[in-house]
Image (spheres, rainbow, N blue to C red):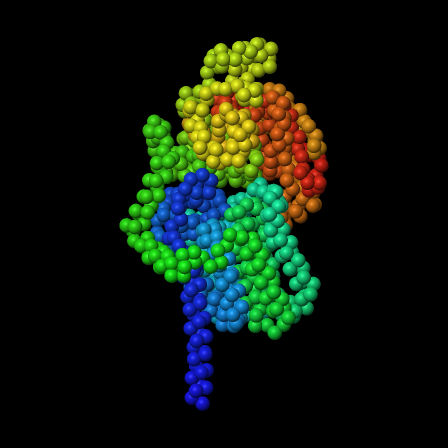
Amino acid sequence: MTFDFFKSWFIKNNEYFFKYSFIFFLIIYIFPDNFFNPMGFHIDPSWQIAIYQAVEKGLSFGNDIVFTYGPLSTITLRLPIIQNPWLIALLDIYIMASLALFFHRFLSQNKGFYHYLILYLGVVILFSERYFVVTLEQGSLLIFLQIFFLSLFYQEQKKFFLIQAIILTSIIYFIKVSNGVIALFIFFSSLGYFALLKKISIKWLLLSLGILSMMMIGIALIYRVDLWNYTIGNLQTISSYNDVMYLDFPPKNPTDRLFDLGYNGLFLYFSFTVVFFYKTLWKDHFLKWIFAIQLLIYFVLLKQSFVRADQPHYVTFFSFVSIFAILHYWNISSEKTIYKYFALTTTCIALVVSLIGLQKTDLFSFDKGIWGWIDHKFLSIKGYTSYLSEEKHTQKKNEEINNLRGHLKISDSILHKIGKQSVDIIPWDIANIYYNQLQYTPRPVMQSYAVQNKYLIDLNTKKYYSSNAPEFVFYRNSSIDDRYPYWDDVGVKTALLQNYSLVLPSHFNFDAQKYLEKYSDVDSLIKKGVARSPLHHFLTFGRKEKRQIDYYQNFNFDANIYGNNYSAEVSAYLQINKDKKAEDHYKNIGYLENKESSALPFLLKKNKTIKPLKWQTIKSDTLTLNQWIEIPKTDDLIYLFADIQHDWYGKIRRLLFQPPHVVIYLRFENGIEHPFRLPLTIAKEGILINKQVLDNLEALALQVYKGKENPNITAFKIVNTQPKGIKSTIKIQLKKLLL
């Protein structure tokens, strides 16, 4: 009897020891390797820095700043410029404690080696791309915990779990609004459903809503958030993102057909579940709720990951799909139905799909051996805690800033000229302003590639036509994703033309007389009317004819940066043209293909008198897709306003996946025809249609000469790249900008 008791005690405690040792191992595994993320420059680091600056300057989110990330993203972005690093530590501790509780509940309910393996693989997959999970997509991780606590509340009716769900909902909303909207929907719909099933009293239902409201109002007051405009503005940003930021799908690389595997596989999973298990779902109220939540989460993951199907986004899908499948399985693993085994099977399939999708996942991460890994982890913990001291935090902040300031230093003469006056930068390099310690005064949508519908365009336009417009603007003509660069942020661009002047005319380094002397035929071409001036000839024909001019002195063309950014194209060009250089590639090809020239932005200063925005309609018409439309030849600036509408298929495709891909073909004065992506929302608000403005030099010519020297665009046609999705007739207007 004594022996049997001892044996039973030993086995039971051995089981406890193994389980809690395993949980401890998982927590150490997910412990952040770095307290702070490195700072940087260009698009993503710039908007991250802008969020910190907005919080530091007390700008109003929803009014002064409209972006998908909110003020609490300063905690998840983990840059050393955060004012209170303890907030990072508190959130880390909360997440690790909550995950430890989930691990405990999962392993207590599901025993056996294969359950340990499932949980281990889910955690390894989730944190294989640690930067994205812990930094940019921590909101998705918090939604996972929100659903976990709501499930615990449903099962046990303990108010502690409900309070945790409330806390998480409010935090998520102020980290990233797209996740926040989902979190609010899950919370409100769940509470309503729980009330119908009498899982929560009316008293606690109202109390929960009151606590959530007070928390959200409190955070909004602390961080200066206009809740209404914050919500509306960010919903508009999400809608614009869906319409504009898509990438071609499926990707051109056949090895990336994993996207099809993820998308179609989950569609089959949900179809199979509804067809074969509808009776099980119908009878069990809890299963109905958790299945609906699962369906919503997977749809959101698909939209977030595959609308813009580049690595940072599809990594999100493959990282999170497994852990949400594990959560779903845990929720139903106590059920005595065949659906439990179906959920287990689909969880295993999700793990395999994720492992394939994240092919570089290091399943063990012990490249220096287990003891080397343990040593590394405890050194990470030691380094982590050191940054909680003000001295170490300040030292790290100064090191990062001073290092990057050396690379992005603006000339002292420019800094002296600007002084303490307000500055903005177009299109996105906000980091340059921060590292040079200038007085940043942002437009509400702070990066031009994101300004792609009426609401957002109007916000920025209103700012730039107001007395609060920045005194100085750094401007570089560039865009992303094969767009026509001058069409982004169209309202701000018109304000620059009307109300800003070039600060240093010497930066426009074109010697007309020298050009005429070098190319004797140009004078006769001007007299014949082929070209309007030496500059017009160079911009229109000179590049195509490979005529040379030294105009990069003041634009700081960096051949190394340009070559590294476009290594394959530049290398191929240099292989064919042995005597050419990287800048020759840009002059001849790159500017047309919207490749960045690595040119410094030029500086503009606000005029004393602000002119209002005025248009004159010169033509209204209806055209059809694929129809070439001739553009009147004029020195005036003509804008196209095109009302392109989705048909029923296009609307469904836009909702479930991506909108149809529309391009506009432009025929330039030198005879070249080239396609550019055409976002429907921006075409409706007006695009400069008769002047070629493809790079910095042409943008500078437009700013100085108001279109008189720029090459003309002679015709255009609008094309749907898919068989359907767009209505065949398009209403258009041509309007002249009154300068």
Look at the picture and state if 364 lies above or below 418.
below
Occupied quadrant, residue 485: top right
Q: Is residue 329 left or right of residue 99?
A: right
Please provide percent x and percent y for residue 144. 51, 60
| Extreme residue toward the left, this view | 391
Please provide percent x and percent y for residue 106. 50, 68
Between 699 and 313, the one lying in front of the other is: 313
Look at the picture and state if 520 lies above or below 242.
above
Occupied quadrant, residue 20: bottom left
* Residue drawn at 43 percent across, 42 percent down: 45
Specify the quadrant that holds the N terminus: bottom left
Q: Is residue 212 visible?
A: no
Occupied quadrant, residue 284: bottom right
Please provide percent x and percent y for residue 55. 40, 46
* Residue drawn at 43 percent across, 60 percent down: 29
* Residue drawn at 48 percent across, 43 percent down: 66
Number of numbered discs visible in the structure rendering: 0
| Extreme residue toward the bottom, this view | 1
Look at the picture and state if 595 lies above or below 310.
above
* Residue drawn at 49 percent across, 58 percent down: 363
Please provide percent x and percent y for residue 545. 56, 20
